[in-house]
Image (cartoon, grey):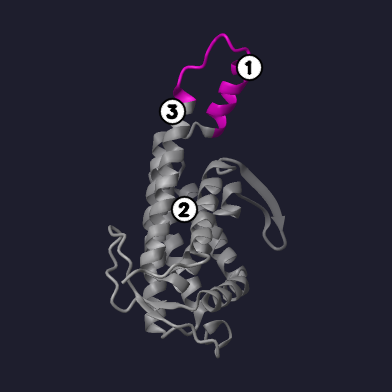
Amino acid sequence: MKAPAFRYYDFLVAGLVAVLLCANLIGPAKVAEVTLPGLGSVSFGAGNLFFPIGYIFADVLTEVYGYARARRAIWAGFGALLFATLMSLVIVHIPASPHEPFNTELQPALALVFGTTARIALASIVGYWVGDFVNSFVMAKMKVWTRGRWLWTRTIGSTAVGQGVDSLLFYPLAFYGIWTNDALLAVIAFNFAFKLGVEVAFTPVTYAVVGWLKRAEGIDVYDTRTRFTPFSLRDEGERRVADASVPGNVRN
């Protein structure tokens, strides 16, 4: 049986990949500082402002289209991130022509912006791959357990687990032995809380988007018999017709 064609799935995959690439390439090394009421000055990586949006895309993909199609999107993001990392390393390390005067300004700038060490690049790829698959797995399982009710519990719950795994993998792999243990733990704790806070803040938007997509696509996937291996591109999941009588097909 031929898999159904979806009108908006490809756009969500493209959005996930775009957010992932931009969050990892634009501003991750910049330390920003803002003053928050009751907290004073708070420092954080500028890229963290937008990285959690990738988890929101993954949540929407899993909730509407199921784990198997979210799995395809995660692999697409993994491939794009791997290619971007390899491309950055090649561009930075390939010898610059001494006959082009502009290279004297361009090469140091490229090295500064894109010259990520292999260790940090590997940590980023591993953290993303494991964290996103854990996020989608928890999201899909909770949907079955809750029978499709209480969307907020699985968007926040899955992100808490996925982001937690991501942070616990990325920061130690990238900075253990470079930062002090106290600094490492402080950064992990703050960034986890910040990313989870973004998910909570976007919950009303997630509800609206999920409800609209289910009605527009006419589908609601439950992963009752899905094989939860990341190493497959098989189309799985129990397809159900979205219930138009329930607002957004999300029961609170």
Could you tell me the amino acid type at mark 2? Leu
Q: On the rendered image, what quadrant is the N terminus found in?
A: bottom left
Residue ID at (55%, 52%): 19
The answer to whether residue 149 is above or below residue 182 is: below
Q: Residue furthest top?
A: 99
The answer to whether residue 206 is above or below residue 18 is: below
Local crowd size for mark 2, using a 10 Å CA cut-off: few (<14), some (14–19), many (≥20): some
**Alpha carbon of mark 2 to alpha carbon of mark 1: how far?**
42 Å
Helix, strand or loop for disc 2: helix
Helix, strand or loop for disc 1: loop
- 202 vs 21, left or right, is right
Disc 2: which residue: 185
Is mark 3 in CB contact (under 8 Å) with mark 1?
no
Residue 235 in sight in this render:
yes
Residue ID at (61%, 43%): 31
Q: Depth check: 52 or 186 in front?
A: 52
Q: Tell me which label, 3 or 2, sits earlier in the chain.
A: 3
Local crowd size for mark 1, using a 10 Å CA cut-off: few (<14), some (14–19), many (≥20): few
Residue 129 inside the magenta-drawn segment: no
Disc tally is 3
Is mark 3 in CB contact (under 8 Å) with mark 2?
no
Disc 1: which residue: 102
**Nearer the camera: disc 3 or disc 2:** 3
Residue ID at (49%, 59%): 10
Could you tell me the amino acid type at mark 1? Phe
Disc 3: which residue: 90
Local crowd size for mark 3, using a 10 Å CA cut-off: few (<14), some (14–19), many (≥20): few
In the figure, residue 229 lies in which quadrant? bottom left
Range drawn in magenta: 92-113
Q: On the rendered image, what quadrant is the C terminus found in?
A: bottom right
Residue 177 in sight in this render:
no
